Amino acid sequence: MKKVLLLAAATMLFAVPAMAAISNTAHDLSSGSTGTNNGASDEVCVYCHTPHGAAAAVNAPLWNRTTVSSSNVYENATLDATITAGLVDGSDAALCLSCHDGSSMTVALNNPPNSGAAVTGLANIANTSEALIGTDLSNDHPVGFSFATASVDTGIDTKTNIESVVGMTGALSFGGGDEMWCSSCHDVHGVTGVGQFLRIANTGSALCLTCHLK
C-alpha cells in the first residue's frame, strides 16, 4: 500500500508542470478558462484526455476525441513531402487536426466528464481564429517526411543535431520513427515563457534555423 501511495504522489508531481503550463492558454477549453474558447465543463484535461473509456488506435495517452477519418484531404500536393496514409493511427497530426481542421470541434467527446452528458457549448475555434488550419495543407509546413531522407538535402540539418538542441529532445521521434510531425515544432501543453505552444522560442528565427541551414 505504501508503494502505491508513493507512486501516486510521484505521478502528481510530474503532472503539475503540464497542468500549470496549459491553464488559461488557448488549449484550456474549460468553462473557467480566461481563454476565448470555453466549453460547458470546468475540467481542463477532459477536452483531450479521459481516465476511462479512451479512444483506441490513436497514438496518444487516454485520448478523448474523435480523430480525423481520412488522410486524403490532408495531402500537400504542392510539395514533395505529403502526409502519409498513416496519418490517422501513426502520427500526431490526426490528433491536432481533430480540432484545427475546423470540422470536428463540435463533436461529442469519446467519454464525457462525470455528468455522463456530452460536453456542449464549445465554440468552433477554426471559424474565428488563426488556429484554423483547414483540410487543405498546401499552404502549411509539410509533415510526415523522414529526416533520414531529408538530410540528404544540404539545406536541412541532421536529426541528431536537431534533437541535441535544448528543448528539441525527441522532436523527430514521434512514435519511434524519424519523421517530421506537428510535435516537432510544437508542445501541445506549452512551454513556460515560450509562446504559440512552440518547443523553443523563435526569436531571430531560432526554431526555424534549428532544422534549416540558412
Image: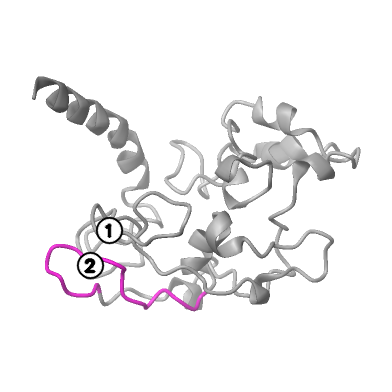
Q: Is residue 154 magenta?
A: no
Quarter of the image where one finds residue 31: bottom left
Q: Is residue 22 above or below residue 58?
A: above
Task: Provide the major secondary structure of the magenta segment.
Answer: loop
Q: Amino acid at mark 1?
A: Val
Mark 1–mark 2 CB contact (< 8 Å): yes
Q: Which residues are magenta?
A: 102-119
Quarter of the image where one finds residue 79: bottom right
Q: CA distance from mark 1 to mark 2?
A: 7 Å
Q: Amino acid at mark 2?
A: Pro
Q: Quadrant of the N terminus?
A: top left
Q: Residue 15's x, y, as percent?
A: 29, 36
Q: Residue 203's x, y, as percent?
A: 65, 38
Q: Residue 43's x, y, as percent?
A: 22, 57
Q: Is residue 185 visible?
A: no
As rendered, which of 210 and 110 lies closer to the eye? 110
Residue visible at 31% across and 69% down in the picture: 109
Residue visible at 55% across and 64% down in the picture: 88
Q: Is residue 42 visible?
A: yes
Query: Mark number for residue 112?
Result: 2
Number of numbered discs overlaid on the protein picture: 2
Q: Is residue 46 above or below residue 191?
A: below
Q: Is residue 110 magenta?
A: yes
Residue visible at 49% across and 60% down in the picture: 95
The residue wearing badge 1 is: 46
